[in-house]
Amino acid sequence: MTLLFLIPLCIIMLFGLAGYGFGSLGRVGVRQAGRALRLRSGAAILGAATVALYTWGLLHLAGAVIGADGNGASASPRPSCRTADQDLWATVVDSRVDYLPLRFVCETSDGGSYVPDIVPGYIGPAAAAFGLSAVVCAAAAAVDSERRARR
């Protein structure tokens, strides 16, 4: 249920951030833009890249959730929980989605759990790097604006 809310919200955020970042630079021009505007635009574009990666991971999770709800002969074990280790298959009792970090978790009858390779491994580190870069750019823009206001 949360996935149905998050995916459209992320898509709206993606286009909003990208529109602000590219639009503000396009209105003035990159060469005529001040440092603060370039930093704010860069933060918005990096934020859009972060949201795009997170949305890509959410789409992978949505596919896994749909696969976990399958019926019929192929439903045991859940297709999303199938791994190379077939001994784990018989112990799967439930599954859940973790949103930070993005991952699909299969819970076993002995109280343990394991994470199949549903979400590509590059999404978490890349989204964190883009997000941190966006925060640094936004902070630098705020410091630059504050310096200019004091003059």
Image (cartoon, helix red, strand yellow):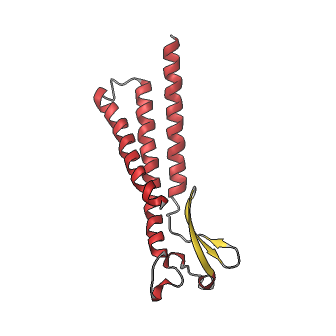
**Which quarter of the picture shows residue 98?**
bottom right
In the image: residue 7, left or right of residue 103: left
* Whole-percent x, y for residue 53 in the image: 45, 53
**What residue is at 33 percent from the left and 39 percent from the top?**
19
- Front residue of 140/70: it is 70
User: In which image quadrant can residue 77 be found?
Assistant: bottom right
Q: Residue furthest bottom?
A: 73
Which residue is drawn at the image coordinates 48% and 21% (left, top)? 145
103 is higher (above) or lower (below) than 148? below
Which residue, as the protein is rendered here, is positioned at the far right?
110
> Residue 90 in the image: x percent, y percent?
61, 85
Q: Give me the residue at 49% from left, 45% from top.
A: 130
As drawn, the residue found furthest toward the front would be 1
- Residue appearing at x 50%, y 57% in the figure: 123
Vertical arrangement, residue 86 with respect to residue 31, above or below: below
Give the image quarter of residue 33.
top left
Residue 2 in the image, given as x and y percentages of width and height: 49, 58
For the image, the number of numbered tags is 0
Of residues 2 and 117, the one drawn nearer to the viewer in this rendering:
2
45 relative to 90, above or below: above
